[in-house]
Image (cartoon, grey):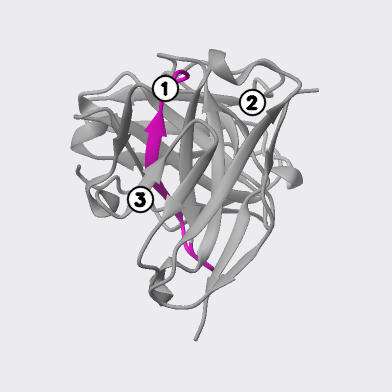
Amino acid sequence: QSALTQPASVSGSPGQSITISCTGTDVGRSDHVSWYQQHPGKAPQVVIFGVSKRPSGVSDRFSGSKSAKTASLTISGLHLEDEADYYCCALAPGSVYVFGGGTKVTVL
Amino acid sequence: QAQLVQSGAEVKKPGASVRISCTASGYTLTSFYTHWVRQAPGQGLEWMAIIDSTGGWSTYTQKFQGRVTVTTDYLDVNSLTFEDTALYFCAREAPGTGNLDLWGPGTLVTVSS
Protein backbone atom coordinates (compact mmCIF):
# COMPACT_ATOMS: atom_id res chain seq x y z
CA GLN A 1 0.00 0.00 0.00
CA SER A 2 1.20 3.51 -0.79
CA ALA A 3 2.05 6.16 1.74
CA LEU A 4 -0.20 9.08 2.57
CA THR A 5 1.64 12.39 2.87
CA GLN A 6 0.59 15.06 5.32
CA PRO A 7 2.35 18.28 6.33
CA ALA A 8 4.20 17.86 9.61
CA SER A 9 2.64 20.94 11.12
CA VAL A 10 0.00 23.59 10.52
CA SER A 11 -0.74 26.56 12.73
CA GLY A 12 -3.34 29.27 13.00
CA SER A 13 -4.75 31.85 15.34
CA PRO A 14 -8.05 31.42 17.18
CA GLY A 15 -10.93 32.13 14.83
CA GLN A 16 -8.93 31.47 11.70
CA SER A 17 -9.42 28.56 9.30
CA ILE A 18 -6.76 26.02 8.51
CA THR A 19 -6.58 23.18 6.01
CA ILE A 20 -4.60 19.95 6.32
CA SER A 21 -3.82 18.02 3.16
CA CYS A 22 -3.39 14.28 2.69
CA THR A 23 -1.97 13.09 -0.60
CA GLY A 24 -1.55 9.61 -1.96
CA THR A 25 -2.66 7.12 -4.58
CA ASP A 26 -4.96 5.35 -2.14
CA VAL A 27 -6.78 8.61 -1.45
CA GLY A 28 -7.45 8.94 -5.14
CA ARG A 29 -9.04 5.53 -5.47
CA SER A 30 -10.99 5.32 -2.22
CA ASP A 31 -14.20 6.86 -0.92
CA HIS A 32 -13.22 5.59 2.52
CA VAL A 33 -11.07 8.51 3.60
CA SER A 34 -11.31 9.46 7.25
CA TRP A 35 -9.66 11.90 9.63
CA TYR A 36 -8.78 11.38 13.29
CA GLN A 37 -7.95 13.88 16.01
CA GLN A 38 -5.59 12.81 18.78
CA HIS A 39 -4.83 14.82 21.88
CA PRO A 40 -1.68 13.92 23.86
CA GLY A 41 -2.10 10.75 25.87
CA LYS A 42 -5.54 10.04 24.42
CA ALA A 43 -6.97 7.62 21.90
CA PRO A 44 -7.78 9.02 18.46
CA GLN A 45 -11.30 10.26 17.71
CA VAL A 46 -12.90 10.39 14.29
CA VAL A 47 -13.83 13.83 13.01
CA ILE A 48 -14.57 12.99 9.35
CA PHE A 49 -15.29 9.71 7.55
CA GLY A 50 -16.33 8.84 4.01
CA VAL A 51 -14.33 11.85 2.73
CA SER A 52 -16.80 14.44 3.97
CA LYS A 53 -19.23 12.89 6.44
CA ARG A 54 -19.23 14.30 9.93
CA PRO A 55 -20.15 11.96 12.81
CA SER A 56 -22.83 13.11 15.19
CA GLY A 57 -21.34 15.09 18.01
CA VAL A 58 -18.46 16.47 15.94
CA SER A 59 -18.46 20.23 15.52
CA ASP A 60 -19.56 21.55 12.12
CA ARG A 61 -16.33 23.56 12.14
CA PHE A 62 -14.73 20.36 10.80
CA SER A 63 -15.20 19.59 7.12
CA GLY A 64 -13.61 17.24 4.63
CA SER A 65 -13.20 17.11 0.87
CA LYS A 66 -11.22 15.36 -1.82
CA SER A 67 -9.84 16.23 -5.22
CA ALA A 68 -7.93 13.66 -7.26
CA LYS A 69 -5.26 12.20 -4.97
CA THR A 70 -5.55 14.81 -2.24
CA ALA A 71 -7.98 14.84 0.66
CA SER A 72 -8.34 17.88 2.85
CA LEU A 73 -9.53 18.55 6.38
CA THR A 74 -10.58 22.12 7.10
CA ILE A 75 -11.08 23.44 10.60
CA SER A 76 -13.00 26.70 10.59
CA GLY A 77 -13.08 29.18 13.46
CA LEU A 78 -10.08 27.61 15.15
CA HIS A 79 -10.47 26.98 18.89
CA LEU A 80 -7.75 26.37 21.43
CA GLU A 81 -9.05 22.84 21.99
CA ASP A 82 -8.44 22.04 18.32
CA GLU A 83 -4.72 21.90 19.09
CA ALA A 84 -3.91 18.23 18.52
CA ASP A 85 -2.43 15.77 16.06
CA TYR A 86 -4.55 14.91 13.03
CA TYR A 87 -4.25 11.77 10.92
CA CYS A 88 -5.83 10.91 7.61
CA CYS A 89 -6.65 7.30 6.78
CA ALA A 90 -7.64 5.64 3.53
CA LEU A 91 -8.80 2.22 2.42
CA ALA A 92 -6.23 0.62 0.12
CA PRO A 93 -6.39 -2.37 -2.24
CA GLY A 94 -6.71 -5.68 -0.48
CA SER A 95 -9.03 -4.21 2.14
CA VAL A 96 -6.16 -2.84 4.18
CA TYR A 97 -6.02 0.67 5.58
CA VAL A 98 -3.18 3.15 5.67
CA PHE A 99 -2.63 6.21 7.86
CA GLY A 100 -0.87 9.40 6.95
CA GLY A 101 2.13 10.48 8.97
CA GLY A 102 0.11 12.96 11.02
CA THR A 103 -0.08 16.74 11.26
CA LYS A 104 0.45 18.70 14.45
CA VAL A 105 -1.98 21.59 14.64
CA THR A 106 -0.88 24.49 16.79
CA VAL A 107 -3.25 27.25 17.83
CA LEU A 108 -1.14 30.35 18.25
CA GLN B 1 -22.31 3.76 27.28
CA ALA B 2 -20.42 1.91 24.56
CA GLN B 3 -16.74 1.38 25.19
CA LEU B 4 -13.88 -0.91 24.29
CA VAL B 5 -11.93 -2.36 27.19
CA GLN B 6 -8.36 -3.50 26.59
CA SER B 7 -6.02 -5.63 28.68
CA GLY B 8 -3.28 -4.10 30.78
CA ALA B 9 0.27 -3.08 29.99
CA GLU B 10 2.81 -5.78 29.18
CA VAL B 11 6.59 -6.00 29.40
CA LYS B 12 8.16 -8.67 27.20
CA LYS B 13 11.62 -9.79 26.21
CA PRO B 14 12.76 -9.86 22.59
CA GLY B 15 11.57 -13.01 20.84
CA ALA B 16 8.57 -13.44 23.12
CA SER B 17 4.90 -13.18 22.18
CA VAL B 18 2.13 -10.98 23.55
CA ARG B 19 -1.65 -11.24 23.55
CA ILE B 20 -3.80 -8.13 23.90
CA SER B 21 -7.53 -8.48 24.49
CA CYS B 22 -10.26 -6.10 23.37
CA THR B 23 -13.72 -6.46 24.87
CA ALA B 24 -16.87 -4.57 23.92
CA SER B 25 -19.00 -3.11 26.66
CA GLY B 26 -22.40 -1.53 26.21
CA TYR B 27 -22.95 -2.79 22.67
CA THR B 28 -22.85 -5.97 20.62
CA LEU B 29 -19.39 -6.56 19.18
CA THR B 30 -20.80 -8.92 16.59
CA SER B 31 -22.29 -5.97 14.73
CA PHE B 32 -18.94 -4.35 14.04
CA TYR B 33 -15.54 -4.96 12.50
CA THR B 34 -12.49 -4.63 14.74
CA HIS B 35 -9.32 -2.82 13.68
CA TRP B 36 -5.93 -2.90 15.37
CA VAL B 37 -3.71 0.16 15.22
CA ARG B 38 -0.42 0.80 17.00
CA GLN B 39 1.58 3.89 17.88
CA ALA B 40 5.26 3.78 18.78
CA PRO B 41 6.44 6.36 21.33
CA GLY B 42 6.36 9.82 19.78
CA GLN B 43 5.35 8.42 16.41
CA GLY B 44 2.23 8.32 14.25
CA LEU B 45 -0.56 5.79 13.91
CA GLU B 46 0.18 2.53 12.12
CA TRP B 47 -2.69 0.35 10.89
CA MET B 48 -2.14 -3.36 11.50
CA ALA B 49 -5.18 -5.51 10.82
CA ILE B 50 -8.93 -5.85 10.57
CA ILE B 51 -11.31 -8.69 11.36
CA ASP B 52 -15.00 -8.96 10.61
CA SER B 53 -17.70 -9.44 13.20
CA THR B 54 -17.84 -13.24 12.85
CA GLY B 55 -14.10 -13.85 12.71
CA GLY B 56 -14.49 -15.40 9.28
CA TRP B 57 -12.44 -12.80 7.44
CA SER B 58 -9.36 -10.87 8.39
CA THR B 59 -6.69 -8.86 6.60
CA TYR B 60 -3.24 -7.75 7.70
CA THR B 61 -0.95 -5.09 6.39
CA GLN B 62 1.96 -6.75 4.62
CA LYS B 63 4.46 -5.74 7.29
CA PHE B 64 2.70 -7.89 9.91
CA GLN B 65 1.59 -10.88 7.86
CA GLY B 66 2.80 -14.11 9.44
CA ARG B 67 3.73 -12.50 12.74
CA VAL B 68 0.40 -11.12 13.88
CA THR B 69 -2.91 -12.92 14.41
CA VAL B 70 -6.25 -11.34 15.21
CA THR B 71 -9.51 -12.81 16.44
CA THR B 72 -12.69 -11.02 17.40
CA ASP B 73 -11.35 -10.90 20.98
CA TYR B 74 -7.59 -10.35 20.82
CA LEU B 75 -4.40 -9.55 18.98
CA ASP B 76 -1.35 -11.80 19.12
CA VAL B 77 2.09 -10.49 18.15
CA ASN B 78 4.92 -13.03 17.90
CA SER B 79 8.71 -12.75 17.73
CA LEU B 80 8.73 -9.36 19.42
CA THR B 81 11.57 -6.93 18.76
CA PHE B 82 12.42 -3.61 20.38
CA GLU B 83 10.62 -1.91 17.46
CA ASP B 84 7.33 -3.44 18.64
CA THR B 85 7.34 -1.24 21.73
CA ALA B 86 4.16 0.74 21.22
CA LEU B 87 0.66 1.57 22.37
CA TYR B 88 -1.75 -0.86 20.72
CA PHE B 89 -5.32 0.28 20.08
CA CYS B 90 -8.39 -1.66 19.03
CA ALA B 91 -11.17 0.25 17.29
CA ARG B 92 -14.58 -0.67 15.90
CA GLU B 93 -16.04 0.04 12.49
CA ALA B 94 -19.63 -0.25 11.41
CA PRO B 95 -19.18 -2.54 8.38
CA GLY B 96 -18.58 -0.75 5.13
CA THR B 97 -18.29 2.76 6.54
CA GLY B 98 -14.54 3.11 7.08
CA ASN B 99 -15.50 4.99 10.22
CA LEU B 100 -13.48 3.92 13.25
CA ASP B 101 -15.93 5.52 15.61
CA LEU B 102 -14.95 3.96 18.93
CA TRP B 103 -11.43 3.30 20.17
CA GLY B 104 -10.08 1.45 23.16
CA PRO B 105 -7.73 3.29 25.54
CA GLY B 106 -4.70 1.44 24.23
CA THR B 107 -2.42 -1.20 25.70
CA LEU B 108 1.24 -0.35 26.18
CA VAL B 109 3.62 -3.13 25.16
CA THR B 110 7.23 -2.60 26.13
CA VAL B 111 9.89 -4.89 24.68
CA SER B 112 12.96 -4.79 26.86
CA SER B 113 15.82 -7.13 27.63
Work out how far the residue at label 2 is from the one at label 1, CA to CA, in angstroms. 33 Å
Quarter of the image with the N terminus of chain B is top right
Circle 2 — which element?
A: loop
Identified at 29% across, 52% down, the residue is B64
Tell me where the magenta segment starts and ends, as one range. B40-54
Q: Give the labeled residue for mark 2.
A: A61
Judge by depth and name the residue closer to the eye, A33 or B16.
B16
From this view, report whether residue A39 is shown above or below residue B73: below
Judge by depth and name the residue closer to the eye, A93 or A29.
A93
Task: Give the x, y percent position of residue B10.
Answer: 61, 65
From this view, report whether residue A66 is shown above or below residue B81: above
Q: Pointer 1 indicates a residue of which chain?
A: B
Q: Which amino acid, mark 3?
A: Val
Task: Give the x, y percent position of residue A48.
Answer: 52, 25
Q: What mark, if any, has residue B68 been given in the picture?
A: 3
Q: Pointer 2 indicates a residue of which chain?
A: A
Work out how far the residue at label 2 is from the one at label 3, CA to CA, in angstroms. 39 Å
Asked whether B6 falls inside the magenta stretch, the response is: no
Query: Are the two marked residues, 2 and 3, in contact with CB atoms closer than 8 angstroms?
Result: no
Task: Give the x, y percent position of residue A87.
Answer: 47, 44
Discs 2/1, front: 1
Identified at 60% across, 21% down, the residue is B29
Q: What mark, if any, has residue B52 been given in the picture?
A: 1
Q: Which amino acid, mark 2?
A: Arg
How many marks are shown on the rendered structure?
3
Circle 3 — which element?
A: strand
- N-term mark: 1 or 3: 1
| Residue occupying the far right of the picture | B1
Judge by depth and name the residue closer to the eye, A99 or A76.
A99
